[in-house]
Image (spheres, grey):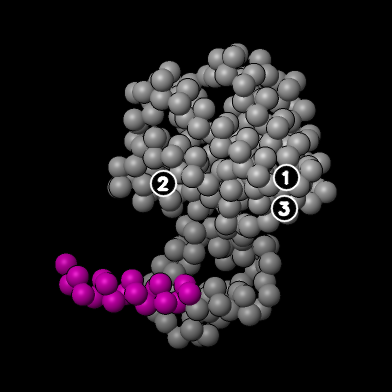
Amino acid sequence: MRPRADVTKKTKRALSLAQHIVRDIEAGAHIAGDRLPREDEMLARYDVARATLREALRFLELQGVIHLQLGRGGGPVVARPQTGDFANSLSLILHFMEADLRGLLELREAIAPDVAAYAAQRATTGDLSALADCLKELERNVEGSRFEELNRRFHDLLGWASGNPLFGLLTSAMHLLTREFSHSLGYSAQERAVQLRFLRRVLEAVRTGDSEAARNSMARLVSGSAAYLAERSPELVSQKVRWGHI
């Protein structure tokens, strides 16, 4: 059996190499779809063992930085990490922290009002158009099976409209983490109507640049939604986040 110290040293070398490759991707201004050098070229460039290079590349693939193309002419191809990559890593951490849906709902209550306020200050014409289109779809599907999906999409769009990609990333990741839970719960017709009413108010406040109104309307929406979920399905709210459910 290989001594633990040797395994740890190899892992550190692979991680250091992965970081080096990322810096080279940035320095070379590579974009998604660009091919990286072949394995023999990378071995010569980085002066590492084949096993170390392959471990580094596997690590980058897991993080969504590259994908490994198989077959003749294959090899590492630059990718762009997606929200799902972040959400997957986050769900693994939350799994071991034994976080539950209630914790995610409380996080949403903490940040969603400020996200709406920032969107009121920074939303572009394109953002407003996308939000308005999404709201129209929600109104058409208020009694349909796509209500929860479109509701999440509206909040996602609002997160990215905040002008801060961290808000957009976190909002979208939270929705990926909670999507599995939502399959077990349907909003009542009355709750859907309430949420739609507040979403209209949020959009109007964002459109007019009224950040305080946007914050207040969103605060009432998310706090009311959390109270509804806690009362209707307390056992669901207590369920733990599990890795692999995204």
| Residue at image point 83% right, 49% down | 125
User: Circle 2 sits on which residue?
Assistant: 91
Where residue 118 sits: x, y (%)? Answer: 66, 51
| Residue at image point 67% right, 40% down | 213
Secondary structure of the residue carrying tag 1 is loop
Return the disc, 2 or 3, that comes first in the chain's sequence. 2
Q: Nearer the viewer, residue 185 or 80?
A: 185
Q: Are marks 2 and 3 in contact (CB under 8 Å)?
A: no
Where residue 121 sits: x, y (%)? Answer: 72, 52
User: Circle 1 sits on which residue?
Assistant: 210
Asked if residue 180 shows in the view, the reply is yes
The numbered mark at residue 77 is none
Return the disc, 1 or 3, that comes first in the chain's sequence. 3
Q: Which residues are magenta?
A: 1-19
| Count of numbered badges drawn on the protein | 3
Q: Horizontal placement of 82 versus 185: left or right? A: right
User: Circle 3 sits on which residue?
Assistant: 121
Task: Give above or below for 166 relative to 84.
Answer: below
Quarter of the image with the N terminus in it: bottom left
- Crowding at dot 3, Cα within 10 Å, few <14 / some 14-19 / many 20+, comes out as some
Q: Quadrant of residue 25?
A: bottom right
Where residue 153 sits: x, y (%)? Answer: 65, 37
| Residue at image point 75% right, 20% down | 140
